[in-house]
Image (spheres, rainbow, N blue to C red):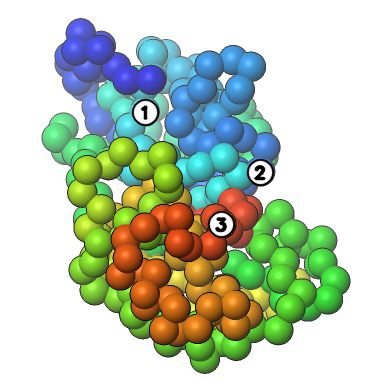
Amino acid sequence: MRMNTESKLEMKSRRRNIALLVAYDGTNYNGFQRQNPPSVAIQNILEDRLEKIFGDKIELAASGRTDSGVHALGQVVNFFTDGRIELENIPKATQGILPPDIVVRKAWEVDRDFSALHSAKSKIYVYKIQRGETINPFVERFSWHIPYALDVEKMKAALNLIVGEHDFSTFKAASNVQRNPVRKIFSAEIFSEEIFCADILSIKIHANGFLYRMARNIVASIVAVGRERLSLDDFKKIFAARDRNLAPPTAPAQGLCLQEVFY
């Protein structure tokens, strides 16, 4: 849903432009972007609760529209308001009225021309893979469980191939309508960590932007390389072909988290 021109003008006539740093567990929501009932998205909840705090209608702009089941540690949103609540009181004020799986971590006032979406310079997404024969229930909601052996060195080599500016048509969603599939990946790394006694393999990608489902599609192909279902040469050919139909199915949503947005 988009604001009409009159709504935009009305919103921008308000005194303050406030940005929020938001974290959420996306498991129970139909993504971030506002949905029509009975579907519920993060934006529906945030706008409804913020209206109670600020006393006027709130329409959020967000750095990105995370998909259904995807999480965020560093989602950024902004909105215009005449509400007078002090910035330092906003996170605390939201605690009592937001569900426990959505948290406002920080609030600050920004220039009138700031947009959480359009002002963003780059983003970091992290995808977590849980290794081992059995599922660890403490990380199950936030990782993709893979009980098979993975060749991490080959996965690293495949990730190195996507660093730089490329056409990422191979890794966009089949339904993606964005005209320009070129994005620049500044870094792509893979590392092991232990979380709640679970053996986690994390894939961290920093880019100037992401096509719809690009991060999850990259991960799916990297995992295929790790399982030796794709050779490095296969990966190179699929990447160069710019054809989504040649790549593996999309990795599950629950492993992905929007970690940080840079402005």
Question: Can see residue 29?
Answer: yes
Q: CA distance from mark 3 to mark 1?
A: 32 Å
Q: Quadrant of the C terminus?
A: bottom left
Mark 3 vs mark 2, foreground winner is 3
Location of mark 2 (residue): 27
Q: Residue at x 54, y 55 (%)?
A: 250
Q: Residue at x 32, y 65 (%)?
A: 241
- Using residue 100 as the reference point, say whether residue 135 is left or right of it: right
- Using residue 192 as the reference point, say whether residue 3 is left or right of it: left
Which element is circle 2 on? helix
Q: CA distance from mark 3 to mark 2?
A: 20 Å
Q: CA distance from mark 1 to mark 2?
A: 21 Å
Which element is circle 3 on? loop
> Which residue in the rendered view is the most extreme toward the bottom?
153
Q: Which one is in front, 5 or 47?
A: 5
Location of mark 3 (residue): 249
Location of mark 1 (residue): 60
- The crowding category of the residue bearing disc 2, from other C-alpha atoms within 10 Å (few below 14, some 14 to 19, many at least 20), is some
- Using residue 145 as the reference point, say whether residue 166 is left or right of it: left
Which element is circle 1 on? loop
- The crowding category of the residue bearing disc 3, from other C-alpha atoms within 10 Å (few below 14, some 14 to 19, many at least 20), is some
Estimate the x, y position of residue 177 in percent, counting from the top left: 31, 38
Q: Quadrant of residue 38?
A: top right
Question: Can see residue 260?
Answer: no
Estimate the x, y position of residue 174 in percent, counting from the top left: 42, 45
Contact check, label 3 and label 2, Cβ < 8 Å: no
Mark 3 vs mark 1, foreground winner is 3
Q: Residue at x 36, y 38 (%)?
A: 62
User: Three-letter amino acid code at disc 2?
Assistant: Thr
Q: Residue at x 29, y 17 (%)?
A: 3
> Which callout, 1 or 2, points at the residue further toward the start of the chain?
2
User: Three-letter amino acid code at disc 1?
Assistant: Leu
